[in-house]
C-alpha cells in the first residue's frame, strides 16, 4: 500500500480541485489522504494581495472540511495548521510518513511573477518530499496516462523520499516521455537526458515504456511547457535541484517559472545536487 498523500486545503477552488485530484490518484494506488487546513493568506492566493480574504470561525472550518472529505471515497485524516505553514507541513509529513504533498495553484497569469510567492519551492525546501502542484482549470486526466519528465544532460541523484514515486509510476504504468530542451542552434537529441533519467532509478519497471522528445527553444521553462504540450502530457515531472529552491530568488529559477505558468499537474522531485 502506498504511504499517504498530504493535501493542503484553504477552501479555494484551486485547493478543492487539488483535493479531488489527490483522492482520485490515491484511489488508483490504494493510498490514504492527510488533509491539512491552512489559512488562505499563507498560500499562493491572488486575494492575499488585495485584502479580500475572509477569516473563518472554527465551526465554519469544521463544516467546510466535512463537506469536502465526505464524498472522497478514500480514508482521510484531517488536521489544521494555525501558524507557520512550512513548519506545520514538514511536521505532518514526518508524523504521517507522507510520500507526496499536494498543493493547488490558482490562476496567477495576471499577477506579476515578482509578486507571487513561490510557495511550492518553499514547501519543497521545508519537507524535501515530492510535491504535486495542481493548477486550477488544467487538464486533469487522473490517473495520468502520459507522463513527461523534463531532464537536462546532467546526472540525477534523487533523495530517498522520491523512491515512492518510482513505485507509484510502476503501479500506474503510464506512457513516459523524457523531454530535453536545447538551444535552437544545438542538437535536440535527448539520448543523454534519457540516460540520466534511467540511471536515477526513477523509471524502475516501466523503463521499456519510455521514449525521447527534443525541443529547441531559447528559454528553457517555455521549452519544457512546449514539450509537455507536444507529448500530450497529463503530468509533467520536474527534477528540482538544490539550487532551484535553496536560493532567495525563487521566481528566477527554471522550476519556479514552469510552476508559475504551467497548466497541467506538475510533480516536483527533490534532487541531492
Image: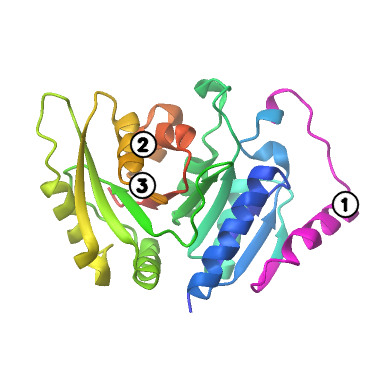
Q: Using residue 250 as the reference point, say whether residue 43 is left or right of it.
A: right
Q: Please name the residue shown 50% across and 23% down the image.
A: 113
Q: Which element type, helix, strand or loop, lies under badge 2? A: helix
Q: Judge whether 252 appears above or below 271 on screen.
A: above
Q: Which element type, helix, strand or loop, lies under badge 3? A: loop
Within the image, what quadrant is residue 255 found in? top left
Give me the C-alpha separation between circle 1 and circle 2. Answer: 39 Å
Q: What is the magenta range? A: 48-77
Within the image, what quadrant is residue 19 found in? bottom right
The reply to whether the C-beta atoms of the residues labelled 3 and 2 are less than 8 Å apart is no
Q: Using residue 123 as the reference point, say whether residue 238 is left or right of it.
A: left
Question: Which of these two is toward me, 59 or 206?
Answer: 206
Question: Which of these two is toward me, 96 or 260?
Answer: 260
Q: Name the residue under label 1.
A: 60
Residue 110 percent location from the top left of the image: 58, 22
Q: Using residue 207 as the reference point, say whether residue 58 is left or right of it.
A: right
Q: Which mark is residue 225?
A: 2
* Render colour scheme: rainbow
Q: Which of marks 3 and 1 is in front?
A: 3
Q: Please name the residue shown 26% across and 52% down the image.
A: 177
Q: Earlier in the sequence, mark 1 or mark 2?
A: 1
Q: Name the residue under label 3.
A: 232
Amino acid at each position: 500500500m502506498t504511504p499517504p498523500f498530504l493535501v493542503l486545503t484553504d477552501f479555494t477552488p484551486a485547493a478543492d480541485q487539488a483535493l479531488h485530484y489527490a483522492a482520485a490518484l490515491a484511489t488508483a494506488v490504494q493510498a490514504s489522504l492527510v488533509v491539512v487546513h491552512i489559512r488562505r493568506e499563507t498560500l499562493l492566493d491572488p486575494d492575499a494581495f488585495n485584502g479580500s480574504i475572509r477569516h473563518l470561525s472554527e465551526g465554519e472550518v469544521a463544516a467546510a472540511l466535512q463537506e469536502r472529505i465526505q464524498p472522497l471515497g478514500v480514508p482521510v485524516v484531517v488536521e489544521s495548521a494555525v501558524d507557520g505553514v512550512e513548519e506545520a507541513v514538514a511536521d505532518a509529513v514526518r508524523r504521517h510518513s507522507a510520500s507526496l504533498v499536494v498543493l493547488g495553484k490558482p490562476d496567477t497569469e495576471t499577477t506579476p511573477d515578482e509578486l507571487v510567492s513561490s510557495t511550492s519551492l518553499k514547501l519543497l525546501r521545508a519537507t524535501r518530499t515530492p510535491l504535486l502542484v495542481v493548477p486550477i482549470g488544467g487538464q486533469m486526466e487522473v490517473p495520468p496516462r502520459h507522463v513527461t519528465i523534463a531532464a537536462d544532460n546532467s546526472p540525477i541523484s534523487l533523495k530517498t523520499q522520491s523512491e515512492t514515486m518510482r513505485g507509484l509510476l510502476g503501479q500506474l504504468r503510464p506512457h513516459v516521455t523524457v523531454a530535453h530542451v536545447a538551444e535552437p542552434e544545438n542538437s535536440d537529441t535527448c539520448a543523454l537526458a534519457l540516460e540520466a533519467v534511467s540511471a536515477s532509478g526513477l523509471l524502475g519497471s516501466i523503463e521499456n515504456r519510455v521514449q525521447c522528445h527534443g525541443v529547441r527553444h531559447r528559454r528553457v521553462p517555455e521549452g519544457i511547457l512546449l514539450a509537455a504540450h507536444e507529448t500530450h502530457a497529463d503530468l509533467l515531472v520536474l527534477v528540482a535541484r538544490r539550487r532551484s529552491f535553496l536560493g532567495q530568488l525563487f521566481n528566477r529559477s527554471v522550476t519556479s517559472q514552469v510552476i508559475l505558468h504551467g497548466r497541467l499537474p506538475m510533480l516536483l522531485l527533490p534532487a541531492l545536487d
